[in-house]
Amino acid sequence: MAVVVTDKCRDCRYTECVTVCPVVCFHGDDRMLYIDPVSCILCQACIPVCPVQAIYDEVDLPPGMTRWVEINAERAAALPLIEDKQTPLKTMT
């Protein structure tokens, strides 16, 4: 199982999730965040704090979004860690 960031995060990139995560498992590019399934401890603390409801437990992913499990694993492995709260992207502020 995994906790997964979906495309609802794209172009807003709120980082409230990073501030409640007890481990460092969020990675990001210039458009959104991703969760490293290897580092994530499945605590789900990030799910309720996401202001755009972009984060799901894998078992709760809406139909058609299961591809985000693999996308998170691939992208997180290739991107830098996000360890602190950052300013959201202008498109959503």
Image (cartoon, grey):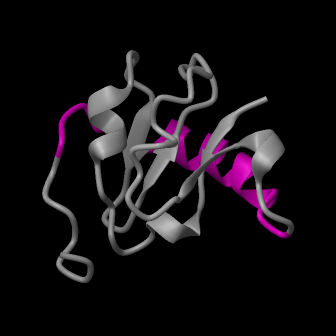
Q: Which residues are magenta?
A: 64-85
For the N terminus, the image quarter is: top right
Q: Position of residue 27 (x, y in %)?
A: 40, 41
> Up-down: is 25 above or below 64?
above
Residue 82 occupies quadrant: top left
Name the one closer to the observer, 70 or 59: 59
- The structure residue drawn at horizontal position 70% and vertical position 56%, both measured from the top left corner, is 68
Q: Is residue 72 magenta?
A: yes
Question: Furthest residue to the front?
Answer: 48
Residue 81 shown left or right of residue 62 in the figure: left
Q: Quadrant of residue 3?
A: top right
- State which quarter of the image contains the C terminus: bottom left
Q: Magenta span has 84?
A: yes
Direction from residue 56 to residue 87 in the image, left or right: left
Res 8 seen here: yes
28 to 65, vertically: above or below = above
58 relative to 84 in the view: left or right: right
Could you say where residue 87 lies in the image, as x and y percent from the top left? 13, 58
Residue drawn at the location 36% of the way across and 68% of the way down: 31
58 or 39: nearer the viewer: 58
68 up-or-down from 25: above or below = below
Residue drawn at the location 84% of the way across and 70% of the way down: 64
Image-based side of 32 in relation to 58, left or right: left
Instruction: Write the residue at 18% across / 42% down.
Output: 85
Q: Position of residue 12 (x, y in %)?
A: 33, 70
**Residue 11, placed above or below residue 53:** below
Determine the residue located farthest toward the left in the rendered image.
87
- Report whether residue 81 is seen: no
Residue 58 in percent (x, y) is at 76, 42
